[in-house]
Image (spheres, grey):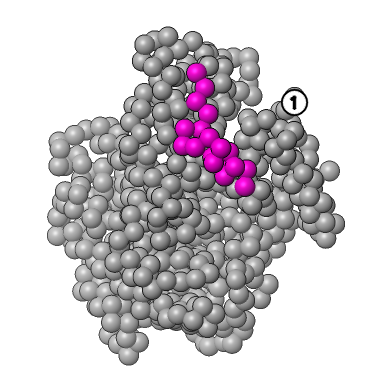
Amino acid sequence: MATLCMSSASIYQNASTHNFHFQRPHRFICKSITKTTADATSVDLRRRSVNYQPSPWDHRYLLSIENKYVNAKKVISRDLLKKKVKKMFDVETKSRLELLEFIDELQKLGISYHFEQEINTILTYFHLKHGNNVSRDDNEEDLHATALEFRIFRQHGFDVSEEIFDVIINKIESNTFMNEDIKNIISLYEASYLSTKSDTKLHKVIRPFATKQIRKFVDDEIYNIEVREKAIHALEMPYHWRMKRLETRWYIDAYEKKHDTKNLVLIELAKIDFNIVQTAYQEDLKYVSSWWKDTCLANKLPFIRDRIVENYFWNIGVIYEPQFGYVRRIMTIVNALITTIDDIYDVYGTLEELEIFTSIVESWDINRLDELPEYMRLCFLILYNETNGIGCDVLKYKNIDVIPFLKKSWADLCKTYLVEAKWYKRGYKPSLEEYMQNARISISAPTILIHFYCTFSDQISTQILESLSQHRQHVIRCSAVVLRLANDLATSPDEMTRGDVLKSVQCYMHENGASQEHARAHVQQMISDTWDEMNYETITAGRSSSLSIGFVEAAMNLARMSQCMYQHGDGHGSPDKAKTVDRVQSLIVDPIPLY
């Protein structure tokens, strides 16, 4: 059995930090690596068993990974290439379309974060010059330019009217649209996913039309393999919904296949920068893997998902830039604790134990530790220490006490977990609305994002903290809905098989007498509708919202990451079966070769 002891070893060495440098001590060192197994404990028929597979990642292996292509010379080369790219932002020598395509390539190659000021300057200049209607081209040949401009401006929070597509929409509706250039159609398709809830033409006319045309192209095209692959990639998931860093890895390979339009400076910078950023991820992962091992949670609680790598992978999706290493590390700790507590409620705890645990988290009283069964004590103590440690760091460096808000977020999460546990134990079948009302919190997005706000934000507002704590920020509700529904579509079949509370698909089926196919289509439409609401939040963030654009983007990235994690199944619970292992390998382990 693993044992505990206190330690003062620094766990923030070599951290890539944001805004400030922290040093907090390890609170737990696991002296024994003997893992408790289900066979070693007495069988309790009140408890369920899922038998999650062990982590596919060995801790010693994680400590050994490195990128052999990164050294001081490559960093110097990267900086020289950045200077060359900055000179390419020339409104005098490049056309409007050329500059927009250039910005689009920087984003897709994952290097736009180096040029945020230049990009914002150009887009602001174009927007002030042309206003909300951007460039309204009546010519079908200009469709790519119009669609690209609409998408780029909307992505950056500029308010652009869907009316720029009126001529195209009229031709689609009158069956007089003649443009068969698949590049134009894909641009139109991608632009349609930047719609808001008021943009009825985009998602009722343009999106179905473009989708149909791309599918027809994929079915018929046999010669142009490069374009066909791009079309298939778009149909699998639109660019706007994709996890950015994985898209970067895919696009670097796709970009290298280009012949006539390839910019050699851009691709060289993208490959070197990818490797440099990968080294930051590797250091992050070594740190969080060591933290996780030292907690002993995977050994003490053998029924939980041992998923520290996957918990870190989520945070590359939420905020990928290398300078935010501290944020990723703290958020990985938060995610790991959420996964652990979720499994206690969902799998192992009895109703009586869960009620006590919920009460103690709500009271945040360490003196009540003895009321808990042994397996819960370690979990609560780590939760208590880590949360207070985060709050202590924020108080020291940002001069505000956030602990009351952080601990409330954990109490709210546990209370919704308890509701679901009671539903399951009592065989209760909630309506879809009742399920979602609870699930928006139980999916953990509010807990994740309030911790993110405290660690990410330069200036912390008590007013915003209160709105986050009281679940009044719409963008967080939207992010939570997408996260919950994406999770349900991927995991509910297995969860229903082993026994669990009804999920959104089953709630809709039970409430409406619908087939599973129809219910899944309804849930998928709910995801699409929620994205319309989040897109609106992006536009308002720069004008009237009290939340920063960076925070709103992170909330949307959490939704993107959920669709990535659950795209091919339960990528969090069964990472080897849902491509998560391969994706982690491509972003954190395997470098891009440089010759």
Residue visible at 66% across and 35% down in the picture: 99
Q: What stretch is highlighted in magenta?
A: 121-138
Of 363 and 340, nearer the camera is 363
Tell me which secondary structure the magenta stretch mostly adopts. Answer: helix
The residue depicted at 37 percent of the width and 39 percent of the height is: 196
Q: Is residue 229 above or below residue 48?
A: above
Above-or-below relation of 251 to 16: above
Residue drawn 19% across and 39% down? 509
Residue 301 position by quadrant: bottom left
Q: Mark 1 points at which residue?
A: 259
Work out whether residue 106 or residue 461 is closer to the camera in this orientation and state it: 461
User: Which element type, helix, strand or loop, lies under badge 1?
Assistant: loop
Query: Residue 592 colored magenta?
Result: no
Q: Can residue 101 be seen in this view?
A: no
Q: In this view, does 17 lie to the left or right of 131?
A: right
Q: Quadrant of residue 278?
A: bottom right
Q: Position of residue 529 (x, y in %)?
A: 33, 40
